[in-house]
Image (cartoon, rainbow, N blue to C red):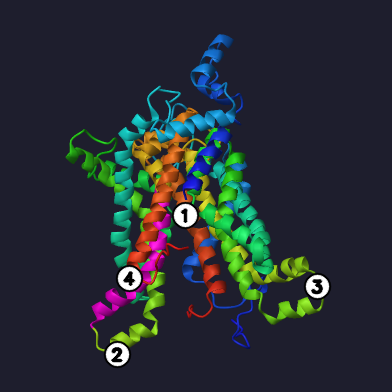
Amino acid sequence: MSIPESNGKRKAGLGRLRRGPRPPGSVVVAFAFVAVILIVGFFGEPLVREAARQDLTEVSQPPSYEHWLGTDRFGRDVLARMIIGTSTALLGPFLIAGSGLVISALLGITAAYLGGWVDQVIMRWVDFMIALPGLLVTIVVVSVIGGSYGVAIIVLSIFNVQGDIRIIRGAALEQKPLPYIESLQSLGFSKSRIMFRHIVPNVSPLLVADFAIDFSLALVALAGLSFLGLGSEPGSAEWGAMLAENQSIIFSNAAATLGPGFAIVLLAVSVHLIGDWLYDRYSAPARLVS
Amino acid sequence: MVPIVLFMTLAVFLLSSLVPGGAVAALLEGRPTSSAQIEFLTAKYGLDRPLHEQYLSWLTGMFRGDLGRSFRTSQLVTDMVGERLGITIWLNVMGLVLAVAIGVPLGVVAALNRGSRLDRFVVGVSIFGSSSPAFFVAIFFLWLFAQNLGWFPLYGAGGPALWSRLWHLTLPGIVMAVAPMGLIMKVTRASMLDEIDQDYVAFSRARGLRERRVILGYGLRNALIPILTAAGLIFVGLLTGTVFVERVFGLPGLGNMLVQAVITSDLPVIQGLTLIIGTWIVVANLIVDIMYAVVDPRITYDKTK
């Protein structure tokens, strides 16, 4: 069980993840769901490649024993295609959230620790970008330079990072007046060493929480782009694209369009729950009495 | 804020010059052509002039209310926007109004009954709502309410009669409200929780004020600032939602126009819509800033600044 903190002050750091109260049931379910999706994403594709073949004798069938979510306009098994699309669904958000983690750690901590004009420049930029509707701008940019999955990921990464920078800067500002920073300074450690070897571990739970939230937002945004036909290659097994193309057979097989939709929402909600839970545990200490 | 709008249009303009083959290639979309035709098109749309000249002529046109003509349909962009603006504004306003009208009371009630079943329900709804993309909610509601229950029409914006219009736009409007409602509930709940722990709330109760007055007159009034900030973000975010909702329901609004323009590389239309999106953001932020001062009299906008 949990080991109480001796001085009541919160001690950050990833090592603390293992202590503290147990996560609520919803978070446990979320973890389990994410684990299943990860396994499916890594190992699922070879198992179902056969079922995802075209079969024009079985077009737009409703769910049945052979086809759990029915078939699409080309007689392809919808569930099999969803499983094939899982790795794509995971990769894009992973890259976007990962870049958000690295950039927000770099810029957020730099802004907080150095302060002054560096802080000013970074935060003005953040304020400006946050006011823009990211997905809409992405739609325009992707369309103008020619849509592809790669471009979509880069542009979404640029728009995703602002919120993280704000949060990490705030957390780093809390660290700055703590005694350990002062002692490091008096030991003559370089600024970059203090920032990235000492502050980073102390804000790392927040970085992980941000990663989770970003992941769920990016998942939804990328699916949206594919839904509009801007993200993925036409015809590829991608959840958002499947949702869009199967909308036309909603009368004969509603599961073909609702299935991928639920996959997106459930994965997004699960990752979001995990992120919220991490965030609540490590960012607002006083108010969260369980 | 005005420079931001101009910056956005300039950015789109510069990006469009990066299109492989330039705007003419976009115009031809890969059809076989003679060089004479290319020259004709280049001259017709003034694409042979230097970039800054093209941008300046677009800019001066804009101030005269001329956004150019669509590459695709040769219609005036302003006419196209005029035909479609009504639906988009209706959807956005309805989404925002519904989100606030349902989200704020539920958020307040959840905060007052913290930890209750209702509170957990509200938290759950807000998590699902704010994580559900508009395109999925749209298809799901379409399937549930229009196809299975038959309460609403399936497709299109209805006839020209007002009643038919409203009837067709009700379900899309509700879809627009789902995601922002989740966010509004979440923010309201958090903000109210902060306020009801404050001393002034306990003190007002001790003074014997009625509970309703304490909660609505004092607590909620103070909790409104974060809610307003969220509402501002939502008003901008709803624009993205419109694109998906109009697409799913087949509504002829600005969102559908944008997707159409994007798919066909219709640069003048994209450019014109960017201007409108930019203006929309500026106006939304302006309204929120004004509302801040209305809600909290301590906030003033000093003219001497």
Q: Which residue carries the number 1 mark? A: A266
Q: Which residue carries the number 3 mark? A: A189
Instruction: Say which of A176 and A6 sits in front.
Output: A176
Q: Are marks 3 and 1 on the same chain?
A: yes
Q: Residue B190's spot in the image, x, y percent?
A: 41, 71
Q: Mark 4 is on which residue type?
A: Val
Residue at 45% in and 23% down: B71
Residue at 33% in and 67% down: B295
Instruction: Say which of A247 and A224 sits in front.
Output: A224
Question: What is the chain identity of the residue bearing mark 2?
Answer: B
Q: Which residue carries the number 2 mark? A: B206
> How far is disc 1 from disc 4 in space, using C-alphas?
27 Å
Q: Which residues are magenta?
A: B210-238
Dominant SS type (magenta): helix
> How far is disc 3 from disc 2 in space, using C-alphas?
55 Å
Mark 3 vs mark 1: in front: 3
Q: Residues within 10 Å of mark 4 (few under 14, many from 20)?
A: many
> How far is disc 4 from disc 2 in space, using C-alphas?
21 Å
User: Is A21 drawn above or below residue B160 in the view shown?
Assistant: below
Q: Which residue carries the number 4 mark? A: B108
Q: Residues within 10 Å of mark 2 (few under 14, many from 20)?
A: few
Q: Mark 1 is on which residue type?
A: Leu
Q: Residue A68's spot in the image, x, y percent?
A: 44, 43
> How far is disc 1 from disc 2 in space, using C-alphas?
46 Å
> How far is disc 3 from disc 1 in space, using C-alphas?
46 Å
